[in-house]
Image: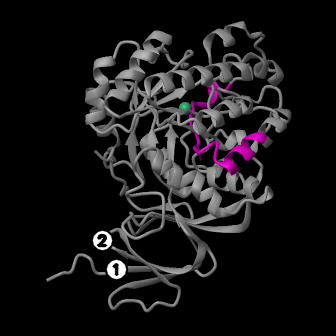
Amino acid sequence: MRDVTAVELVLRSTRVITPGGMRAASVAVAAGRIAAVLPYDAGVPAGARLEDLGDDVLLPGLVDTHVHVNDPGRTEWEGFWTATRAAAAGGVTTLVDMPLNSLPPTTTVEHLRIKQAAAVDRIHVDVGFWGGALPDNLDQLRPLHDAGVFGFKAFLSPSGVAEFPELDRERLARSMARIASFGGLLIVHAEDPHHLAAAPQRGGPRYADFLASRPRRAEDAAVAHLVAEARRLDARVHVLHLSSADALPLIAEARRAGVRLTVETCPHYLTLTAEEVPDGASEFKCCPPIREAANQDLLWRALADGTIDCVVTDHSPSTADLKTDDFATAWGGISGLQLSLPAVWTAARARGHGLEDVVRWMAARTAELVGLDDRKGAIEAGRDADFAVLAPDETFTVDPAALQHRNRVTAYAGRTLYGVVRSTWLRGERVAVDGEFTEPRGRLLTRTP
Ligand SMILES: [Zn+2]
């Protein structure tokens, strides 16, 4: 009789990133899960294959909880096949898809089923889904929660697509209360529409004009309102893609006071600055915008002290023709899925952080955010055998032609980054190595009930 728990694979490295830190270890894999983290020189069980990684770092596959796949409906922007290949190439083994920019958006159970059907058998990494909170789908929230979405996204200002309208304050409160009533998570694009409307809207190719049109105070006011409502309704709320460092003191104070607030930021806010964006270069356009270097320093400090929980890509591509040189009308969104690990690692190491920190921000904390920390986000017994193998001291220059994204538009073109992803493993199978991929082995994920 076959013993299904027999160790089939041992991954050995002088540098394995475990929850307790980086150390030499041998990681035993059985039935697609981590069976044990053993001493480096532990014997290899009979029948098991040894994969000796030398000094390359073994880290948990990243968990990216903010990805716009756009499939079905806008698959010319991105699709499950291409997005998950980009993820696998970049060391990301789990992604959670945003409810908008696909058609339909993920705002009813029926729509969720359409999305899942579009993804199944076409994904190279595991994929879960966020639901959407719209002005008119209040009664869909509980059914979507029960169907396994990880939470609900809402906008306070226009989303950029007509089929996903924002919530006004009254509807935000109603949705937040409903989601809190069943213990769900509300995730919010936090820019206040009144502050945006009051800001100068000059349009055109100058980045300084675009930056002025999405001021920090729009984010700060929206975050303040979310904090107040989360406190009043005892709701769990997550601030998406925080860019304004001016909101950090308020966030820190709210968290100290016990408000159930979590916060993410993105690689582009941590690695690119407003000062260096060329005029007309709308591959750098996203909302909220990339801000000044001094603002970026404060975001890093907040990551270090835990005021910001995690780093996610907000990978949000479009076709190249929508990236015009007018910042007012160009599509807003930065494609970062394949490059997020080296981009963040390059900046992190320059600021004295270790790879353990990067793993905490991009795997452990994101898995916790969506309740996948029973399965994903760390190298410890019982979790899925999802790994990235990284050569952290090797560099490469970003060549758009090497990207797996459907549209090879990138704000990182020509940059030299540290950290070459040698291979990516999903449930004990090597799914990506050197730009080659196995057939899709990803699974659809649902929230742990
Ligand atoms: Zn987004």
- Please report the bounds of the magenta region as a residue range: 298-323
Q: Residues within 10 Å of mark 1 (few under 14, many from 20)?
A: many
Is the CB atom of the residue marked by disc 2 within 8 angstroms of ligand 1's nearest atom? no
Is 219 placed above or below 360 here?
A: above
Q: Which mark is residue 8?
A: 1
Counting from the top left corner in percent of width and height, residue 327 is at: 72, 21
Residue 132 or residue 177, whichever sits in front: 177
* Residue at 74 percent of width and 46 percent of height: 301
CB-based contact (under 8 Å), mark 1 and mark 2:
yes
Counting from the top left corner in percent of width and height, residue 56 is at: 62, 74
* Residue at 64 percent of width and 58 percent of height: 357
Mark 2: which secondary structure? loop
Amino acid under disc 1: Glu
Counting from the top left corner in percent of width and height, residue 168 is at: 50, 11
Q: Earlier in the sequence, mark 1 or mark 2?
A: 1
Amino acid under disc 2: Ala
Q: Which residue is mark 2?
A: 31
- The answer to whether residue 276 is left or right of residue 261 is right
Q: Quadrant of residue 211?
A: top right
Color encoding of the figure:
one colour
Counting from the top left corner in percent of width and height, residue 151 is at: 40, 34
- The answer to whether residue 211 is left or right of residue 330 is right
Quadrant where the C terminus lies?
top left
Q: Residues within 10 Å of mark 2 (few under 14, many from 20)?
A: some
* Residue at 30 percent of width and 33 percent of height: 145
Is 140 a magenta residue?
no
Can residue 283 be seen? Answer: no
Q: Residue furthest left?
A: 1
- The answer to whether residue 222 is left or right of residue 62 is right
Q: Quadrant of residue 73?
A: top left
